[in-house]
Image (spheres, grey):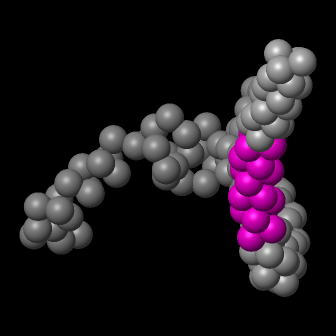
Amino acid sequence: MDKPTTSAAAAAAQDSNLLPDSPQHGPTLSSASSFEALTRHDPNLSRLATKMFNKTEEYITHELNAPLEDYKLLEEMNKATIAKYKDMRQIAENLNTSTSELSLKFQQLAPMMQQIDEISDTVDKLEAAAYKLDAYSIALENRVKCVLQRKSGGGQVAQ
């Protein structure tokens, strides 16, 4: 047999010398490998290995399902947000419509409110004139009374 000329081939040959051969099937994968498909194994070891694989499967399944659940939660939150925004949009549209209607009514009432303001100003001026007229009439009445008292008082003195 030829000796390997490369160092990698030499290392592989040396490693193969360290691994024990299986009594039934030849060389095994590693020195710690105890798995051989056709040999009978310890039932406790098989049960524990099966349990370990089941637990590992369960763990990996949960680890993979956690982000999926997060995405489902985000999807539900997005749906709720979309519904809220639709409601808010409807409310905003209703407010816009109501505001437009009120603006139109205000524009229609603006000339009438201007007339009301003018009438109010006129009433205020009329009221001020009425107070002046009342004050003048009271002063005039007092003068007339005073003149009448002089006439009636002066006529009695002449008698």
Name the residue at 89% across, 18% down: 159
What main secondary structure does the magenta stretch of the protein show?
helix
- Picture residue at 55% right of the left edge, 40% below the top: 33
- In which quadrant is the N terminus drawn? bottom left
Looking at the picture, does residue 35 appear above or below residue 41?
below
Question: At which x and y percent is residue 98?
Answer: 87, 72
* Residue 69 versus residue 51 in the image, above or below: below
The image quarter containing residue 129 is bottom right
Question: In the drawing, does residue 8 fall left or right of residue 51?
Answer: left
Examine the rendered structure and indicate whether residue 152 appears above or below residue 4: above
Q: Is residue 15 magenta?
A: no
Q: Residue at x 11, y 68 (%)?
A: 6
Is residue 133 inside the magenta stretch?
Answer: yes
Q: Would residue 92 be found to the left or right of residue 8 on screen?
A: right
Question: Can you see residue 122?
Answer: yes
Q: Which residues are magenta?
A: 118-137
